[in-house]
Amino acid sequence: MYPARSNRSAWTNILRFSSPSLMRIFIFCILLIQLALKATASSHPGSLSPQIPSIKSFSPSDQIIVDPAFAEVSDGPGQPSLFGFAQTFREDLVSVTGFTDLPQVQNASVSSVNSSTVFLTLGVSNSSNLTLFNGDVAGEGYEFEITESVYTIRGVEVLGAWWGTRTLIQQVILSIASGSDPAQIPTGVGEDNPGWEVRGFMLDAGRHWFEMPFLADLCTYGSFFKLNEFHLHASDFIYNPAILYNSDNTSWRSLYTGFRFQPPTSSPIFGLVPELNESWTKDQFTSLQTTCANHGVKIIPEIDTPAHSLVITKWKPELMITGTPDLLNLTYPETIPTLKEIWDEIVPWFTSDEVSIGADEYDASLANDYISFVNDMHDYITSTSGKSIRIWETNEPSSTEFINTNVTIQHWWFPGGSIPVQLMDQGYDIINSETKCRAEDSDEDEGQNSGSTKADGSEDTKTKKKKHTSGSQPQPPPEPLTQPQPPEGSQSSPKQTFTRHQHSTLV
């Protein structure tokens, strides 16, 4: 409490000085105190402005609450609950603002709110407005309403509510960057949803080693831009044709190879890992998947075969095609059983419902063997783990064999590969990772079977998926077509609106 009027003389007596020197010392001390208070205030944006005398105590009114009716709801096994996402949101908000006094997340009804609050719940007013480009309801959609005291986020599904927190935290950052202190967001209502089911990025961790903290940071970073998949290319080698195909038939062993999943020493595939200090244990990878899931990002792990397989042929040279050490001999009796053994050991690590077997850039003259391999691995992995598979689209020529339409095809090369529109018409699910859309893409080695056109380092590849009703029976491969052109006056890509974003910006 401030002093009463009758005691004012006591305050003024404190400020009487016996000498100018004492006055200067006092002023200097006041300046030091002001600097200290300013530093304290900058680290606690939610605090009151500093003053003398200081306030004995102050509790900020901001809080995050979760609708008790949906607090423990999740989008599936191993996925965060709405309450779990709210806790991660609080951690992010503290990290961005320095507001360490933000109370812990609570389950509470919005009707009990009497202070500045972020409220997370489920159940949008009209999900028909929140649809993917193919017309399906976007489970990742959300609505938000901002009043003077409550910022409400309503997700179609739990992940939708999470993306709503990304919009809020982006607005907080933009407000702070523009000079607002504290951050200010206009009142109003809005809605948002992705147009594509898959919005992801890829990192080539097979040719280059990356530590776990960096991978976890990538998930956090991708999540900030509402990307929901992290494709981790986890096995490969550094391509050098002069060494790989050297006539001495031994120099290929000197090429750098990587297989990043480290099985236990008792595993029959333990010898597959070339460098133990450049591999991830099961516990480390599990922790990474949890971190990414807590930020709405699913990891899609890839073990690339039957090409890009030098790491396997170094381990078991008898599995290679003579003269091409990076290609597996799919007709050799032990090749496919060895690959199944690898997946048996590693696939239980993965929490995702889909994995990639790579399957690109194999010898086109062995198309039937290749297609049979893809279908065999699809049947095996699906039946033993319940996970679906995806492959890099290569369009191996065959008039008698075709890939099962339940295999998702990740398109990356046009027009050298098959045409995505044709594959969609046949019933395949397509992920468009067109190589020409990559920021670091170059014309070097264009069209060569070198692997350099896909990724020779870290890669941020925007992926988009169009769901298409799959037939129960595979269809014959398409006839080659030229690249389709949009009709005159039409747009080559869907229009982006203010309230329904495609999230199509490359990271």
Image (cartoon, grey):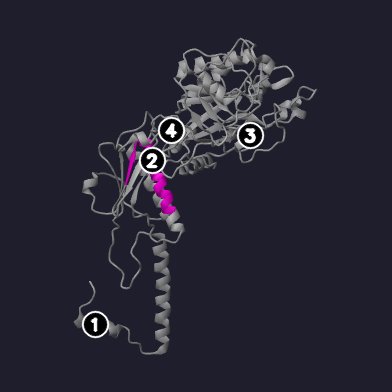
Check contact, mark 2 vs mark 1: CB within 8 A.
no
Residue type at mark 1 is Arg
Q: Secondary structure at mark 1?
A: helix
User: Is 62 or 19 nearer to us in this picture?
Assistant: 62
Q: How would you classify the magenta stretch by its main secondary structure? A: helix
Residue at which label 4 appears:
132
Residues rendered magenta in the picture: 152-173
Mark pair 4, 3: CA separation: 29 Å
Residue at which label 3 appears:
455
Whether residue 14 is situated above or below residue 402 in the rendered picture: below
Mark pair 3, 1: CA separation: 75 Å
Residue at which label 1 appears:
8
> Picture quarter containing residue 489?
top right
Residue at the spot 34% in from the left edge and 55% down from the top edge: 101
Q: Secondary structure at mark 2?
A: helix
Residue type at mark 4 is Leu
Residue type at mark 3 is Ala
Mark pair 1, 4: CA separation: 69 Å
Q: Please name which of the two marks, 3 or 1, marks the residue nearer to the observer.
A: 3
